[in-house]
Image: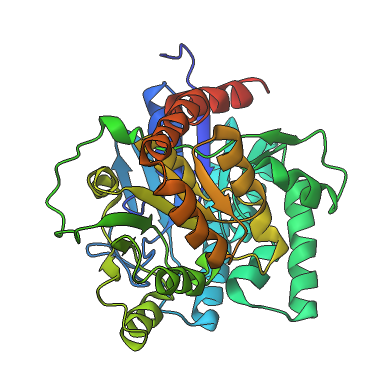
Amino acid sequence: MERIVKMKVLLVTQYFSPENFKSNDIAFELAKRGYDIDVLTGIPNYPEGKYYKGFGLFRKRVEKINGVRVYRSFQFSRGQNKQWRLALNYLSFAFFASIWALFLSLFKHYDCVIVHAPSPIIQALPGILVKKIQRIPLYLWVLDLWPEAMQSGGGIQNKRILTTIENIVKFIYTNSTNILISSEEFRIPILKKGNYNEKIEYFPNWSEDLLFMRQDFDIPALPKGFIIMLAGNLGKSQDLDAVLKAAMEMKNSNNIKWVLIGDGSKKSWIDDAIVKKDLQDNVFTLGRFPFEYMPTFFKSADALLITLSGEYPDLKLVVPARLQSYMAAGRPVLAMIDGAGADLIHKANCGYSVKSGDYISLARIIRDKVFSDLETFEKLGLNGRKYFEKHFQKNKCINHLCKIIDSK
């Protein structure tokens, strides 16, 4: 829908194209709808931990992509699996992007600021600077809860650090015009930090429509058997130890093959564990592939697996983005997950879910329910597809965002 008067929007996010985040959809889809979009972001380095080829301190710091102006602030790269390096990455973006924000505030005018806020939430600080200088609305899309995510994802337990970050988070929430939450379960922990009830609005994640994407990419040959596939980040939060225990439990059952696609901090651990546990014929890690390849992979899977650790309370409030992608693909879901993710699977009736880490129950469900009635199991994937079409299509979600920013 073409706009008569262009609203000028600044999107602040630490992650942007060529990195694969929903910030790309926000910017490019709003531009298609006639909004005038600038993006303040960092030098791309996720997830490899090093600057992408062609980018750097003196290369591609300002560019235009699909009609969107992109300003790339300096940030130290993430590095590989070192907490101090990740902290430096987070802090350097917040600091140097704030300098960019000051410059943009003085020489450009915006009608609103949108902050795309997966971890770290401190990436909102440059946006707040623009908001305060220009006295315009700021819409904060919360995809991770802080400081809780520092404990679950980073293992940080220092009370002084956590208290400091909690105070910063309260400052960010207080200075947001609206707090858009990707999971309804986020509402309670956010309200514990202050009286933000009037600001909170549910704004879910979405997925590309995988059934209408290319499905014939040249992918590695998959093992023969009943394929249970997990795709995405292979990190601490995914409780991959439970996945291997499930594979051990079903090592000699029904020719099941567990296929893991992706990379992350636990990838090398998994590769080592497969050898130590003699699971080379049962569990396969294929590495990382572009998102465009996922429909081809998913089409070949008999079930799509989602897992999340139950160790930390904040993870029970998260709906992992990969779940929407699984539903979009129309494939049945198997899950070891608590809270919001399990609730969504139940609500959509798109698969079977057990408690986080409960590999014994997962194995039992696969034996007693999946293999006893494969036709019914396949239909659960169609239920997920219907739910996706109703709630998680990108076009509907972006239309919702347009209504939010146009209302002020």
Total of numbered circles in the picture? 0
Viewer-proximal residue among 106 and 378: 378
- Residue 178: x and y, percent? 71, 36
- Residue 250: x and y, percent? 40, 68
Q: Is residue 73 visible?
A: yes
Q: Is residue 15 visible?
A: no
Q: Which residue is painted at 29% across and 32% down in the image?
A: 211
Image height check: is 28 above or below 399? Answer: below
Q: Is residue 103 left or right of residue 343?
A: left
- Residue 124: x and y, percent? 62, 52
Q: What quarter of the picture does the C terminus occupy? A: top right
Image height check: is 281 above or below 32? Answer: below
Q: Which residue is painted at 56% across and 50% down in the image?
A: 353
Image height check: is 110 above or below 78? Answer: above
Q: Is residue 221 left or right of residue 322?
A: left
Q: What quarter of the picture does the N terminus occupy? A: top left
What colouring does the structure picture have?
rainbow
Q: Is residue 54 left or right of residue 137?
A: left
Q: Which residue is painted at 64% across and 69% down in the image?
A: 152
Q: Is residue 196 left or right of residue 237?
A: right
Viewer-proximal residue among 359 and 147: 359
Question: In the image as oriented, which residue stretches furthest toward the top?
Answer: 4
Viewer-proximal residue among 383 and 24: 383
Image height check: is 24 above or below 61? Answer: above
Question: In the image as oriented, which residue stretches furthest toward the left?
Answer: 218
Q: Which residue is painted at 14% across and 59% down in the image?
A: 221
- Residue 226: x and y, percent? 29, 54
Question: In the image as oriented, which residue stretches furthest toward the right?
Answer: 195
